[in-house]
Image (cartoon, helix red, strand yellow):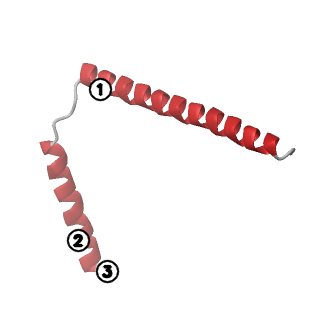
Amino acid sequence: MVSQLRSTREFLEESWVELQRVTWPDWPQLKNATLVVIGFCVLVALIIWIMDIASRFVIDLVMGFFGA
């Protein structure tokens, strides 16, 4: 139990030291990165939506050949 508490404390201390080394982005960098991520998500959503429409069209076409 004591060794587990000691290792947990050591982990937290090392984590704090690492957080001090991090170069945090400023507000304009954060805003631009957020906009890029949102834009990329919208682009991927549009691609998936187009693929869904295309696959639905193909499935309806195939089902129409068999009278379903």
The count of marks equals 3
What's the distance in space between the residues labelled 2 and 3, CA to CA?
A: 10 Å
Above-or-below relation of 43 to 4 = above
Q: Are marks 2 and 3 in contact (CB under 8 Å)?
A: no
Classify residue 5 as left or right of residue 23.
Answer: right
Q: Quadrant of residue 29?
A: top left
Q: Residue at x 87, y 44 (%)?
A: 67
Above-or-below relation of 43 to 1 = above
Callout 2 secondary element: helix
Find the residue positioned furthest to the right: 67
Percent x, y for residue 20? 15, 43
Mark 2 residue crowding within 10 angstroms, few (<14) / some (14–19) / many (20+)? few
Q: Residue at x 16, y 36 (%)?
A: 23
Mark nearer the N terminus (3 vs 1): 3
Q: In the rendered structure, which amino acid carries the disc numbered 2?
A: Ser
Q: Which mark is residue 30?
A: 1
Mark nearer the N terminus (2 vs 1): 2
Mark 1 residue crowding within 10 angstroms, few (<14) / some (14–19) / many (20+)? few
Between residues 59 and 47, which one lies in front from this camera angle? 59
Q: What residue is pinned by disc 3?
A: 1
On-image quarter of the C terminus: top right
What's the distance in space between the residues labelled 3 and 1, CA to CA?
A: 42 Å
Q: Which mark is residue 7?
A: 2
In this view, the mark in front (3 or 1): 1
Q: In the rendered structure, which amino acid carries the disc numbered 1?
A: Leu
Mark nearer the N terminus (2 vs 3): 3
Classify residue 13 as left or right of residue 39.
Answer: left
Above-or-below relation of 60 to 26 = below
